[in-house]
Amino acid sequence: MAGNMTFTIIKPTAIKNNYAGAILKMINEAGFVIKALKFTRISKTQAAAFYAVHEGKPFFKNLIKFMSSGPIITAILEKENAIEDFRELIGATNPENAKEGTVRKLFACSMTENAVHGSDSDENAQIEADFFFNRLEIYY
Ligand code: CMP
């Protein structure tokens, strides 16, 4: 699936605000196929492990606290050119810089509470997907 797969998280505030359905609809309408889907919640330790690459950065503690503050939805998505196309669909990390019509422009509250996560490379998509899903939970 290399090159055709990405991984996403719908973050706690977006879930709390009841945006999950609207976000998943946008994802489907943009041509992504959902290969795995999970409604779950992670601990601070698990959030720190998932975002380990950001450890030591000024926003790390806040990010970990936020990501463990409530339920999330995680998904593996398939589409040609998945990484780039998904990042285009969700918009800039900082919602203030996100283009009109993107997921983050429509549904994010702030840089940390930016509605969704999207993988930044094929390699990280695989690592992130493996963090949340086992083989039996992925429908090829
Ligand atoms: P995400 O795509 O989940 O990947 C890492 C997250 O860290 C990012 O979205 C933001 O929520 C958060 N983040 C990245 N940079 C900053 C920053 N400068 N200030 C606050 N949060 C940040």
Image: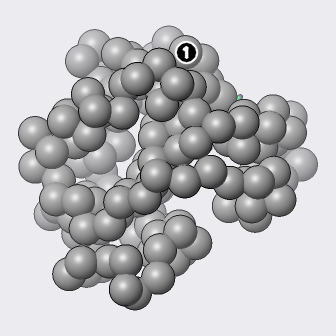
- 56 relative to 12, above or below: below
- 10 relative to 100, above or below: below
On the question of residue 63 being in view, the answer is no
Q: Quadrant of ligand 1?
A: top right
Which residue matches tag 1?
109
Residue drawn at 37 percent across, 86 percent down? 136
Q: Nearer the viewer, residue 1 or 34?
A: 34
On the question of residue 68 being in view, the answer is yes
Residue drawn at 80 percent across, 38 percent down? 65
Which color scheme is applied? Answer: one colour
Q: Position of residue 25 (x, y in %)?
A: 19, 36
- Quadrant of residue 64 in the image? top right
Q: Position of residue 56 (x, y in %)?
A: 89, 48
Residue drawn at 24 percent across, 78 percent down? 139
Q: Going by the picture, which residue comes out furthest to the bottom? A: 135
Location of the C terminus by quadrant is bottom left
Q: Nearer the viewer, residue 112 or 3?
A: 112
Q: Nearer the viewer, residue 11 or 85?
A: 11
Q: Position of residue 66 (x, y in %)?
A: 72, 34
Badge 1 crowding class, 10 Å Cα cut-off, few under 14, some 14 to 19, many 20 or more, is: some
Residue drawn at 52 percent across, 25 percent down? 16
Q: Nearer the viewer, residue 84 or 69?
A: 69
Three-letter amino acid code of the residue under disc 1: Cys
